[in-house]
Amino acid sequence: MGKDIFQRVLIVTVVTLAAILSLLPTILRDNFTQNWFTKPISLGLDISGGVHLVYKVKAEEAVKSRLQSSLALIRSELRTKRIAVVRSAVSPDTTLQISLLTEASLEAAKNTVIEKVPDLTLLRQEMDGPQPRLVFGIPPLLAKKIEHEAIEQAIETLRSRVDQFGVAEPLIQKSGEDRIILQMPGVSDIAAVKKVVGNVAKLEFRLVPSATTGTGIGTVSLRSKNGEPMIVEDQTVMTGDAVSDARVDIDQNGQVRVLLKLSPPGTQTFARVTAENIGRRLAIVLNGVVNSAPTINSAITGGDAEITGFNMDEARELKVVLKSGALPAPLEIMEERTVGPTLGLESVKKGVLAMAIGFTAIALFMVIYYVKSGMVAVVTLALNAVLMIGCLSLFGATLTLPGLAGLALTIGMAVDSNVIIFERIRDEIRSGASRDLAVHTGFEKAFSAIFDANVTTLLAGSLLYYFGTGAVRGFAVTLSIGIVTTLFCAVYVARLCFDYFELKGEKGLSI
Amino acid sequence: MKELISSSAKINFMGKRYLCAVISIICVVWSIWVFISKGDTKYGTDFLGGHEFLIEFQGDFNSEKIRAGLAAQGLPEVRVQAFQGMKNEYSVRLGESTDPQIVRTRIESALKAAFGDVSKIEKTDFVGPTVGKELQRSAILAIGLGLVGIMLYIIFRFEFAIGLGSIIALFHDVIIATGVYLASGHLIGMATLAGALTIIGYSVNDTVVVFDRVREERKKRKNYNISDVVNEAINFTLSRTIITHMLTLFSALALYLVGAGDIKDLSLYLVVGIVCGSYSTIFIVAPVVITWERFKGRDRVTTIGEAQAKRA
């Protein structure tokens, strides 16, 4: 018996110490070493303040832009093969439609498309008025793959953009099929965040048709910065992918500009295109708008390009987004939340006060009603609270306001286990059992009820964690952790206390 | 030994089961009526979508004054509510789905034009319309799975009748708690989901404790009357029931009285749910079990309670 108690005391001591040690960084905060096995408990946005954004990646746009680039390829190929096309476009239902002038060229056109872009499959052949029309699409499996890649790449792009923001501990997380959760604690200027994070930053270089090439076939009309339409070639010379670095500076005339450094393959392409097209204009297109269209005076071989016409803030944003690369698809805001820095603190104070009031009321009742056994209960409840917070720190969980409420509530529910046991012991004493036996059977018989009751609460807690969003998840976390610590404290530790006092030869604890 | 309830108490709970059934039905019908009649206005921003701003005002304000001020500035469609638990904080809600920045600027300038520089936006929430719908769906799914999960667990650990009784009781608790919650002007949000799931997990505790006792008593006896056994088990565990609900109520009430926002919502739901939960074990689960046992023909002995009633 004595040795057995010693072992149990050891277990409880080790567990308690582990909890306290894992809480050290939280208690000592900044003055503590970084190399500890736990970090300070991180506070939810509802406490620390900050920005919470949920984006939906419009992944179907990535499929459309794949079709768009295939279309440009197909057009020029059909042109070389002298197959007359009346209309060709990517339609909103994610199909590529080509209307031919004559039925005779149908087979040739079909073969050309499939040969040039093997990814496409012919969906149907129909009449577009008097003209025959070919409708192509991307097979569903491939489309899924493109969408999936777009989402993954969007997360990567977001990550590198957020990194350049220099925020401590941002959270970027995929959620569901096509959502990205972005949390930035301590940030209040959500407008700046959104401008950088949500900027598609699709950069293209396109030649402007000259008098000799004409403005008919093979061109598209875009808007320029001042809203006027501008005709450019539908083939892009180069995209933002070729940009390896970007920086902001001010030129001799005091104009803010973004200087681009091209990657080696980009430099080659740029050199070749500029050499071949001296005298023509090259349009720099950003997110579908022509930013500028300078005339090519000489071949540019050094791999430098520049974009002008911004103020300093815009230029800085552009630098960040160009360096991190374009988003493969536009983002749509699904949820947007900001919390000011002072609000949370006040709520925490109230939460802690509520906890203290609840705990004191419970402790008073337990001690008055069960006397010494009640004190055992109070000790185990206090230990329970320490263990719960220790576990939060150990698992790196985030403490939110509802999480705090969960802590307070768990204390109230944990005492249930003590009460079940104590009432059971009283029953046994009433029915004439000796003290030892009463304590023994009390714990024994109460266990199944305590266990069942806690399993059901754990089930509810897990569901809440799975289906809940935001701060409420913190409630599910503390509730679930609380169940495990409650079983340990109310059953294991409390039993140890009873056995210990019994062993000390006292008459046992008053109950 | 101090005792709240005398250990020799023999209250005939089962004798009152018809009266309680009537009370329960009235409460459930009333709650469903509250739920339906509130329409979409019962949902908070999480479930409905739209914008919500938590604004701190300096000086003497009330929600009607703020609403009128905003309406005069060309924002007639806003809903203004005092934020419970925080002084001078009001929540302003709008249904549209324009860019949050634009809405924010519009509200800020409208407030400034109406009242001067006395307000500060503390917290903003924008939830897209599709997200709201998704959350509604997952909330229903979570509660449904919770109910079914608990029922299956109870059937697995105990028996079918108790599982059946539990799920009826849990429906009863969640419906009434939601009804009271709504009637007192709170909106359904994530905190409500947290409350409902906690009640589902928690209030079945009573059922477990009472029927754990029933199971034990049945093993001891050969010839028993189910109604009497259940009644005894309830009486046996009555002290525990009252004490533990009282203690959990301490925690929940403290949170309700001191807390604000989500915490206040959550704890109100819990307070009502806890009260419902202790009632429903005694007056719903137990009668269902007794009726089921009798229906199955396992119990033909007249109960003590019924014998007393006949004599009287």
Image: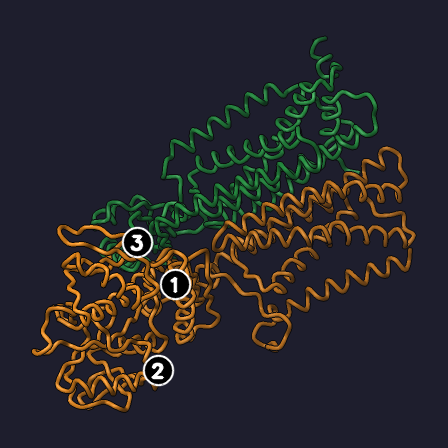
Chain colours: A orange, B green
What residue is at 30 percent from the left and 43 percent from the top?
Answer: B64
Q: Is residue A146 above or below residue B216?
A: below
Residue that carries the numbered disc 1 in the rendered image: A146
Name the secondary structure under disc 2.
strand
What residue is at 25 percent from the left and 87 percent from the top?
Answer: A271
Residue that carries the numbered disc 3 in the rendered image: A123
Pointer 1 indicates a residue of which chain? A
Rendered-image quadrant of the C terminus of chain A: top right
Q: x%, y% of residue A61? A: 31, 61
Q: Is residue A200 above or below residue B230?
A: below
Residue B116 can be seen, yes or no: no
Residue that carries the numbered disc 2 in the rendered image: A244
Pointer 3 indicates a residue of which chain? A
What residue is at 88 percent from the left and 51 percent from the top?
Answer: A502
**Amino acid at dot 1:** Ile
Tags 1 and 3 both on a single chain: yes
